[in-house]
Image: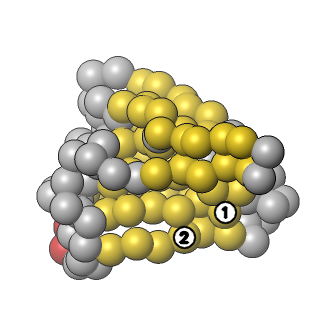
Amino acid sequence: MAQLINLKTFTDVRGNLTVIEKVIPFDINRIFYIYGVDDSVRGGHRHYKTIQAAICIQGSCRIFCNNGKSVSEYVLDNAHKCLILYPEDWHTMSHFSRDAILMVLASEYFDQKDYIYESYH
């Protein structure tokens, strides 16, 4: 099942510095970000192989996950929150704030054959 982790963040009078180091459980092969989202729901799939780490680096959004055994919803509303999505996690992303930027780190390069769009029943 998806797992929420906190990224190490250093804060002082100059601002915040968040580090992504030694906490992502895979080698990163692809990075993409989602922004400028209207009221749409994004995602709606799971994977055969890909593991992902989702970080809302600005604003907020919600991620719904279903691994076929349990269902969870996560609110990503701080740049130090990182949601690890495993291949079996069928997920959707919604409720994006107007300023939201959701960055996703992926273990695999894009491959259309890695996507499973059918949700669990």
Q: Quadrant of the C terminus?
A: top left
Residue 78: quarter of image: top right
Image spot of residue 35 (x, y percent):
68, 69
- Going by the picture, which residue comes out furthest to the top? 70
Q: Determine if residue 47 is in view.
A: yes
In terms of secondary structure, where does tag 2 sit? strand
- Going by the picture, which residue comes out furthest to the right? 98
- Going by the picture, which residue comes out furthest to the front? 13
Looking at the image, is 34 positioned above or below residue 54?
below
What residue do we see at 36% from left, 31% from top? 3
Please tell me which residue lies in front, 39 or 59.
Answer: 59
- Report whether 71 appears left or right of 80: left
Q: 10 Å neighbourhood of mark 1: few (<14), some, or many (≥20)?
A: many
Q: Determine if residue 62 is in view.
A: no
- Residue 72, labelled with which disc? none
- Residues under labels 1 and 2: Cα distance? 7 Å
Q: CB atoms at circles 1 and 2 under 8 Å apart?
A: yes
- Report whether 94 appears left or right of 3: right
What residue do we see at 45% from left, 61% from top? 104
- Disc 1 target residue: 101
Image spot of residue 39 (x, y percent):
77, 58
Q: Quadrant of the N terminus?
A: top left
- Disc 2 target residue: 33
- Report whether 45 appears left or right of 77: left
What residue do we see at 47% from left, 40% from top? 7
Q: How is the image coloured?
A: secondary structure
